[in-house]
Amino acid sequence: MVTLRSSRQPEFILTQKCLGHLLMVLMSSPRQLDTHQKALAINLDQTIFGSIAEIGAGQEVARWFLRVGAASGTVAKTVSAYDKEVSDDLYGAGSRYVSIERLEAMLDREWHQLLTQLEKSRGPSTRFFSFADTVSARNFSGTNECHGWMGIRFQDEPGGEANDVLLHINLRDLSNLLQQEVLGIVGVNLIYAVFYQRTSPEDLSKVLLDQAGLERIEIDFIDVRGAVFQGWNRQDLLLGLVRENLAEAVVFPSGNHRGPPTEILRKRPIVLAPLGWESLVRDHEEMLSAAVRELKTQSGNAATKPLGLFAIPMSPPSVPSPLHPSLDLSSRIDALVRRGSGVLLFGYSELYRMTSFINRYTQAPVRFVVGVSSVIQLFSLPPSSLEGRLLEGLSRLFAQNVCVYVYPMTHVALEESLPSALAAGWKWKSKQGLISADQLQAPPPLGHLLAYLLASKFMVPLRLAS
């Protein structure tokens, strides 16, 4: 028997039969459940029982289950190891405190302890779980990177194998209190999702930011492990984060290392080669390689090697290219990664927004590499979403040590890709069959702006290796 109290209603008592009926009502409701209802639904499910371990930003996930009522039906233990020595004693020393390694250590220990203490008495009728998060919320001075790792280990059925879901999150609220609040919401969403809403990668992704939008929190990495996720494509899970507007961008690095943008891009010189949805052609790889070489030459003996990535928008362009057939996005990323090229998948195609994203993670040089046709498009299609249109877009694009390398194109390729450029007043001269950025002549008054960008080296013509 469970007693629930409300500030507005008199105390009332729920029998086991009432509990089951209330749970059925909550789960069958056609409308979206809020965080309170999700936490209560889990508390009323007599088959779910586990532990909650949280480091940083309070114990906001545990607090939801403790305050909605019937928590004894779900919560075996809550723990928060804020002191570093205590945390090391519990979970081992040697890893960063806000890292996937620390999250995995927390899950390993809490899961082992949970099963050791309760499997014999509760195992035949219980789906166990261990939830953990390790977070760097906004400090008193507001000088830290606000992010963290969150995960859950759970059983799909009593006595079943363990399964994991691991997330990397970025906290975007400006106060510590609001960051605590949104962390609790997402934590409840994750626990609810793995037990009730994980029939597909799309279902799992959709529920994670219920009651919390991208303006408050971002999930830019997800990994799943275990038998219940057999057949799931991890790449599709990452694609889903951008598709469902849970993240601005996700990264698919070449090689075996996988992780969120903060780990792949952090403090690195970056070269981005923006691509549309056209097929991969050899010139794109040559462009990216040439740009990486140019940045290495400019950087001299810099200790950190530039990282070259293709930048692809989630959505195809409004006017598809007549030259190249479209490919399935997932297959396209696969092809690039197999050929040794990393990919950043964005939820938008504007270069100035990509600049803002990259500058979240590095203050090292950032370079874009584009063909000559992209320069004409940049000037011909100013962003309509900005008040200052072209000038504002350019000022945002070239912020914080950014410049654009321009790869030469043949006369034929340029005319085929932009058949309307000549009619719009653009002219060019070819040298040895190639047209470079400094051989473009823009129609007035754009010519003055193009000349300024070239003279100031915001745009740098690349030369083909002889």
Image (spheres, rainbow, N blue to C red):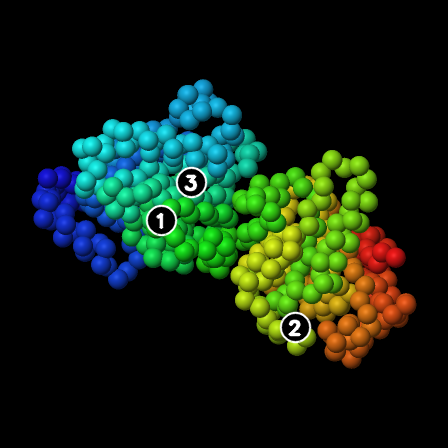
Quadrant the N terminus occupies: top left
Q: Position of residue 432 (x, y in %)?
A: 90, 68
Q: Please tell me which residue lies in front, 339 or 346.
A: 339
Look at mark 3 in the image and give the residue it sits on.
150
**Foreground of the two, 181 or 152:** 152
Mark with earlier residue (2, 3): 3
Cα distance, mark 2 to mark 3?
Answer: 41 Å
Q: Amino acid at mark 3?
A: Met
Q: Looking at the image, tell me whether mark 1 or mark 3 is earlier in sequence order.
A: 3
Task: Answer above or below: position of 167 versus 385.
Answer: above
Tell me where residue 269 appears, x and y as whole percent: 70, 44
Mark 2, mark 3: which one is toward the viewer?
A: 2
Would residue 68 be seen by someone viewing this image from the given angle? no
Q: Which residue is mark 2?
A: 324
Q: Residues within 10 Å of mark 2 (few under 14, many from 20)?
A: few
Label 1 packing within 10 angstroms: few (<14), some (14-19), many (20+): some
- Residue in view at x 46 percent, y 39 percent: 149
Quarter of the rendering occupied by the C terminus: bottom right
Mark closest to the chain's N terminus, 2 or 1: 1
Q: Circle 2 — which element?
A: loop
